[in-house]
Image (tube, rainbow, N blue to C red):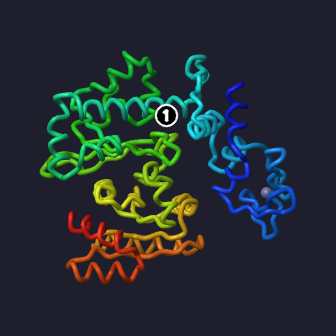
Amino acid sequence: MDQVVQIREKIDIVSFISEFIPLKKAGHNFKANCPFHGEKTPSFVVSPERQIWHCFGCGKGGDVYTFLMEYERLEFPEALRTLAKRTGVELINRERNSGLATQKERLYQINSLTKEYYHYVLLNHPAGKRALDYLKNRGISQKIIETFMLGFAPTRNALTKYLLSKKKFAREDLVASGVAFQRGSDIVDFFRGRLIFPLIDHRDNVVGFAGRILDNNETTSKYINTRETLIYHKGEQFYGLNITKDAIRRENQAIIVEGEFDAISCFENGIANIVAIKGTALTEAQVNLLGRFAQKITFCFDGDKAGQEAIKRSLAVVEKKGLTPTVIEIPVTEDAAVEAFMSFKMTKQVIHNFMISAFFR
Ligand code: ZN
């Protein structure tokens, strides 16, 4: 209980809520249109003195925890973990030890250990050597590998064995997390022989993984993703946002590319306000999420028909939410590139960096 109070006292509720919705000073308090019910005159009030919020329209209210739980639809343990991270308070892991963790929490733990495991194999185990060479050949540096926690899933059933016998997780939780699946009476690793991109949400929860084959000639799908689980919903995620959200906020612009490698190469080339979409067109949930960090949403998709169709459908969603969409076409020549980027009023540095990455593809 002490930790809950300790964390709450470290956060000023006015600046905290301001990160989600714009607050206006009104006497001693701050006001806003309530984010939890539709309204045109503000009845959502935040009190800096009492460090609470209350809506006189829908009756909801509480402290920083309840705000975050309502706004992000979190359970209490997730909200606690998020705010602990933010305030630098080291949580004593009581849920896990007392066996009271919700299944959601257990899935986060499984995914987090899986991320560490694959990362370790990539960097330190002979099984990861080929994947490591592959990344180096694509110009991905050690620093980027570490920043994005890239990994390698070995071919044998090593992860499942590790999580069952060393970490004592239950089989049904491994299957529920999507890192393993049932085959006959056994459970086996879902990702085998693939380069791994952990999908981490903006609150630093590992929600799933994308796995890419190393050899394009293989007959299996180039990419596979964690299926929809209790904690992974494809239409609500962006790849990279956990790393790039500060840059996106700073630039007030998010550049959206299609694939994991596109995002990583742009980042490597100095474009930090970048995310990759998981899926084809933007969903409302995704636009709401990005809208919390930036006003400008810029698409940089492939020139093929599928890419252009996806942009078309996404533009409508972005405009509906009152954000400003722009589109960058992947330039074919250097002159075309300069012209394309100038027309979007990007800074020279951004243009320069972007050209490097565009030609890198
Ligand atoms: Zn309300």
Q: Residue at x 49, y 49 (%)?
A: 233
**In the rendered image, which quarter is residue 188 located in?**
top left
* Numbered label tally: 1
Q: Residue at x 71, y 59 (%)?
A: 35
Q: Position of residue 253 (x, y in %)?
A: 48, 67
**In the rendered image, which quarter is residue 19 located in?**
bottom right
- Whether 76 is drawn above or below 312: the answer is above
Q: Is residue 75 left or right of residue 278?
A: right
In depth, the one of 248 and 287 nearer the eye is: 248
In depth, the one of 51 and 204 nearer the eye is: 51
CA neighbours of label 1 inside 10 A, class few (<14), some (14 to 19), many (20+) = some
Is the N terminus in the top left, top right, bottom left or bottom right quadrant?
top right
User: According to the image, label 1 marks what residue?
Assistant: 108
- Whether 187 is drawn above or below 24: the answer is above
Is the C terminus in the top left, top right, bottom left or bottom right quadrant?
bottom left
Q: Residue at x 82, y 55 (%)?
A: 55
Q: Position of residue 47 (x, y in %)?
A: 82, 51
Q: Position of residue 332 (x, y in %)?
A: 21, 77
Q: Residue at x 83, y 61 (%)?
A: 43
